[in-house]
Image (cartoon, rainbow, N blue to C red):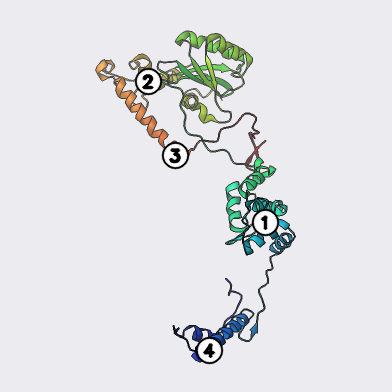
Amino acid sequence: MKVAPYLFTAVWRAGKQLCIPDALSRSPTSRPTPEDEEECTTSTAHVRRIVASTATSTDDQATGPIIEEDKSLQEIRTAASQDQDYCRLVHYVSNGFPTKTAMISTLPPASRIGSCGTTFTRMETLHRRTLDRLHDSHRGIEATRRRARQTVFWPGINADIKSKVESCEACQQLLPSQQQEPYMCDDHPSRPFESVSADFFHLAGKSFLVIADRLSGWPVVVPCGRDTTAARVTRMFCVFFREVGVSLRLRTDGGPPFSSHDFKQFVNRWGVHHIITSPHYPQANGHAEAAVKAVKHLIIKTAPSGNIDCEAFDRGLLELRNTPNPAGRSPAQILYGHPLCTCVPAHPRSFTEEWQTKTEDYDRRTAAQTDQSHEPLQFSCPPLPKLTIGQRVRIQTQRRFDGTRSAS
């Protein structure tokens, strides 16, 4: 890189005219004569003159000394020359550090300026301007740190870059969504309807409530029409609890009926622990979402008008409850211990105990299938840092501006 600005023309010269190689190639002697000493002194002086001349010229082309055109570096040098701490540091580096450590400790770390390879440190008075230039691309913390490692350095630069990026309003408003967290399953019901999930969906101008058992997957569909008030929802759950028993845990997405004061009072009276999943994150209530998807597709195909009081929907829901899951057992088998009799022809022996899947085999296959599906998530979803009380956070809104989401 140092010789890149020059243009060279290769010419041949006799060996006796190549003073530097000729002088350095002579064999040394352990017993030099006065003539050797005189010749060595003359050759050394001649070499020094040639080196000094080639630093400013090559052949007949005058090049002059290399002048640094970077105004930023010139500004740093000017500011450094006026800084007493820097001048003392340069003096210590050039002439040796004092034996008393108290004299060195008087140097503030942020004011030390020197060179280290291709990086430079700069004084505290120029930090802010350099940080602004580093953040001109509005990249993240790590990208800005990588850029800084190529050019500048001062003690505490990583913390300064982090503060600079986190204080940028534009960057914070357009932050990407946080990565997914590792899969956490804190619900392991041991009996049917001990834990249930619930969610609403709308179809053909009508609303439907789907309640699904988290152990068996047994779906319950309740038409609501246009009435989805808290009073209507609490009454539907009263009927549900009357038929199958009171659930210990109820998981919902915290929609308007489930977040009302009346519904909170209702679950407290019945002793139900109401779990509200993360907002705007359907995967958190994925069990209810899967049940809603299956029931919604069934209504679209059997009762497009939204009127589920018909034979087609009843037969479809019966088959849905009787269809085995990937582990080999249907919701009816888990709930009743045997499949239900449907309109599908079946031999009477198919209901006997010898043809039913053993519970132990089913549990083993279910556990293996669950582990296999969750294993990739453990590597691709590292845990997020925990929040502290009093920490200022930004909440991402779902409104889109030019195809992006903003945080407020």
| 183 horizontally vs 93: left or right | left
Q: Earlier in the sequence, mark 4 or mark 1?
A: 4
The residue where tag 3 is placed is: 379
Q: Quadrant of residue 44?
A: bottom right
Q: Is residue 41 above or below residue 91?
A: below
Per the image, the residue denoted by label 1 is: 122
Which amino acid type corresponds to the residue marked 1 in the rendered image?
A: Arg
Looking at the rendered image, the disc whose residue lies closer to the viewer, 4 or 1, is 4
Q: Nearer the viewer, mark 2 or mark 3?
A: 3
Mark number, residue 322? 2
Q: Specify which label sits upstream in the sequence, 2 or 1.
A: 1
Instruction: Give the structural element (helix, strand or loop) at label 1.
Output: loop
Q: Amino acid at mark 4?
A: Glu
Which residue is identified by label 4?
A: 39
Whether residue 284 is visible = yes
First along the sequence among labels 4 and 2: 4
Neighbours of disc 4 within 10 Å: few (<14), some (14-19), many (20+): few
- Disc nearer the start of the sequence (3/4): 4
Q: Which mark is residue 219?
A: none
Mark 2 residue crowding within 10 angstroms, few (<14) / some (14–19) / many (20+)? many
**Residue at 27%, 18% in the rendered image:** 350
Q: Quadrant of the C terminus?
A: top right
What kind of residue is marked 2?
Asn
Q: Position of residue 4 (x, y in %)?
A: 58, 74
Q: Position of residue 205 (x, y in %)?
A: 59, 23
- Per the model, the C-alpha gap separating discs 2 and 3 is 36 Å
Mark 1 burial class by Cα count in 10 Å: few <14, some 14-19, many 20+: many
Q: Closer to the camera, 372 or 18?
A: 18
Q: Nearer the viewer, mark 2 or mark 1?
A: 1
Quadrant of residue 257 within the rendered picture: top right
Find residue 152 and report its horizontal and vertical position in percent. Answer: 63, 56
What residue is rendered at 70% in x and 62% in y?
77
